[in-house]
Image (spheres, rainbow, N blue to C red):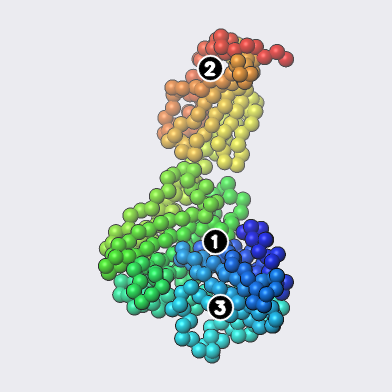
C-alpha cells in the first residue's frame, strides 16, 4: 500500500513525510484488514509541498474521511482535524480532548509515531461515540451489551457504526473479528497476523429486525479453506441474538478448518502408503500439501510413468490417475498420456487397499495403453 502512494509522499512537506510513512505502512489500525489511504494533498501557504490532506480510515466497513491540517510555518504544532461525521466531537471541550487524545495535546513532532498515535486515540474516541449512539436504540443496545459481557468476543475485536451520520440512522453495522485456530494445519510454516475471519452483520428496518451477514476471510485463510469446501454464510434468523449467531459462525469456521486438516491427513497417509509400496520406483511426490505422487512402472519390459493427483476433497473425491509413455509422442510433439478411468475405488478403503487395487488394475491394462500409444503416436528417438 505504501508503494502505491509514493507519488503523494514525494509531494508532502519533509517534516510530515516520516509521520505519514508510519501511518500508511500500518497494515491494520482496527478490525478491518485494510490500510489507510491518502488523497487530496494541498498546501496551506502556497508551497509546492503540501501540508494538508485527507485520510480514508477503514472502520466497520465504512471509510471515515478525516481532513488533516498541518501548518508548514509552525512544524512544532500538531494537526487540526475535520471529520466527515459532524456528530463526532461536536461539543467536546479542550480539557476532555486533552484526556482522550493525549498524543495531540502533548504533540511531539520528533516522534515518527506521533500522527499514528493520534489516529489510534481518535479512532478509540469514535468507537466510544458510536457506542453511545447505539445505547439509544433498544435492540442494538441489547445486542451490544450481550456481546461485551460474553467471554467469546473481546471488546477490541468489535466495531460498530450507525448510518447515515444523522439523528435518524437507518442502518447499523457490527464488524467482529474472529480468531481462527490453524495450529494443527501442518502446511502452515508460520501464522500470519492477517489470518483472520471478519463477520459483518447489518441491522436495518423497523425495530432493526432486517438482518444480513457477510463472512470475510483474509486472502491467506480463504485460499486454504476454499480448497476443500465452499464458503457460505449460515442464515441469521431475526429472532436470534448476535452473540448466539457468532457462536454458530465460530463452529462453522472450526468445522471448515477441521475439514482441511482431515483432508490433508488423509492425503499424507495415502502418499506414505504409496512410498512404502513403491519406494524403489518413486519419481517425485508433494511433501507439503501431499497432492501428487509419480512412479515408474514396468510390465513385460514396457515402462510407463504413473501420475496420481490427490484432490483436496480426497478421499470422498477419488484421485486422478494418468499414464504417461516414455517412448511415444503425439502429433503435437507432446508425450502421450491417458487418463485411467473406471478403476476400482471406495473412499472407505484404507490407503493400502486403494493403492494395491489401483496397481493391479493398471497392470492388467498396461498392454492396452501400450497398443494405444503405438497406434496413435510416433516413437521418441534418443
**Element under disc 2:** helix
Report whether residue 27 is seen.
yes
Dot 3 alpha-carbon crowd within 10 angstroms: few under 14, some 14 to 19, many 20 or more: few
- Residue beneath the point at 56% across and 38% down: 290
Query: Quick check: 136 left or right of 326?
Result: left
**Element under disc 1:** loop
Report whether residue 19 is seen.
no
Vertical arrangement, residue 52 with respect to residue 96, above or below: above
Q: Indicate which label's residue lies in the foreground, 1 or 2.
A: 1
Residue 98 place in picture, x, y as percent: 56, 86
Q: Quadrant of residue 38?
A: bottom right
Q: How far, Cα to Cα, is label 1 from label 2?
A: 55 Å
Q: How far, Cα to Cα, is label 3 from label 2?
A: 77 Å
Vertical arrangement, residue 258 with respect to residue 237, above or below: above
Of pointers 3 and 1, the one earlier in the residue sequence: 1
Vertical arrangement, residue 248 with respect to residue 144, above or below: above
Query: Quick check: 259 left or right of 243?
Result: right
Q: How far, Cα to Cα, is label 3 from label 1?
A: 22 Å
The residue that mark 2 highlights is 363
Residue 235 place in picture, x, y as percent: 33, 55
- Residue beneath the point at 46% across and 74% down: 85
Which residue, as the protein is rendered here, is positioned at the far front?
A: 46
The residue that mark 3 highlights is 81
Residue 272 place in picture, x, y as percent: 57, 35
Q: Indicate which label's residue lies in the foreground, 3 or 2.
A: 3
Residue 244 place in picture, x, y as percent: 34, 63
- Residue beneath the point at 65% across and 26% down: 280
**Element under disc 3:** strand
Of pointers 3 and 2, the one earlier in the residue sequence: 3
User: Which mark is on residue 376?
Assistant: none
User: Which mark is on residue 34?
Assistant: 1
Amino acid at each position: 500500500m505504501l508503494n502505491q502512494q509514493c507519488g503523494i509522499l514525494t509531494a508532502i512537506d519533509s517534516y510530515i513525510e516520516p509521520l505519514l510513512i508510519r501511518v500508511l505502512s500500518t497494515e491494520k489500525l482496527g478490525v478491518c484488514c485494510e490500510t489507510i489511504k491518502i488523497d487530496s494533498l494541498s498546501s496551506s501557504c502556497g508551497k509546492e509541498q503540501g501540508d494538508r490532506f485527507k485520510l480514508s480510515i477503514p472502520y466497520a466497513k465504512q471509510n471515515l474521511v478525516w481532513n488533516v491540517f498541518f501548518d508548514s510555518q509552525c512544524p512544532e504544532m500538531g494537526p487540526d482535524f475535520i471529520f466527515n461525521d459532524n456528530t463526532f466531537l461536536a461539543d467536546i471541550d479542550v480539557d476532555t480532548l486533552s484526556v482522550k487524545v493525549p498524543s495531540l495535546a502533548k504533540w511531539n513532532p520528533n516522534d515518527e509515531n506521533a500522527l499514528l498515535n493520534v489516529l489510534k486515540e481518535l479512532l478509540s474516541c469514535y468507537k466510544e461515540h458510536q457506542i453511545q449512539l447505539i445505547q439509544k436504540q433498544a435492540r442494538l443496545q441489547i445486542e451490544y451489551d450481550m456481546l461485551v459481557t460474553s467471554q467469546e468476543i473481546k471488546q477490541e475485536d468489535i466495531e460498530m457504526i450507525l448510518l447515515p451520520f444523522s439523528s435518524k440512522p437507518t442502518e447499523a453495522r457490527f464488524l467482529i473479528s474472529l480468531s481462527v485456530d490453524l495450529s494443527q494445519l501442518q502446511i502452515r510454516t508460520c501464522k500470519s497476523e492477517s489470518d483472520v475471519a471478519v463477520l459483518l452483520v447489518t441491522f436495518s428496518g423497523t425495530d432493526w429486525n432486517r438482518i444480513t451477514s457477510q463472512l470475510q476471510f483474509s486472502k491467506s485463510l480463504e485460499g486454504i479453506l476454499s480448497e476443500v469446501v465452499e464458503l457460505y454464510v449460515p442464515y441469521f434468523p431475526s429472532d436470534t441474538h448476535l452473540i448466539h449467531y457468532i457462536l454458530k459462525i465460530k463452529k462453522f469456521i472450526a468445522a471448515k478448518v477441521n475439514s482441511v486438516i482431515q483432508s490433508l491427513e488423509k492425503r499424507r497417509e495415502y502418499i506414505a502408503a504409496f512410498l512404502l509400496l513403491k519406494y524403489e520406483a518413486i519419481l517425485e511426490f508433494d511433501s507439503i500439501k501431499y497432492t501428487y505422487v509419480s512412479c515408474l512402472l514396468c510390465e513385460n519390459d514396457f515402462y510407463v510413468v504413473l501420475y496420481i493427483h490427490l484432490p483436496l476433497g480426497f478421499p470422498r473425491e477419488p484421485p486422478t490417475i494418468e499414464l504417461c509413455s516414455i517412448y511415444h509422442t503425439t502429433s503435437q510433439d507432446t508425450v502421450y498420456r491417458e487418463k485411467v478411468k473406471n478403476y476400482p475405488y471406495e473412499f472407505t478403503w484404507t490407503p493400502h487397499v486403494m493403492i494395491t487395487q489401483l496397481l493391479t488394475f493398471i497392470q492388467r491394462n498396461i498392454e492396452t495403453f501400450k497398443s494405444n500409444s503405438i497406434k496413435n503416436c510416433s516413437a521418441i528417438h534418443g
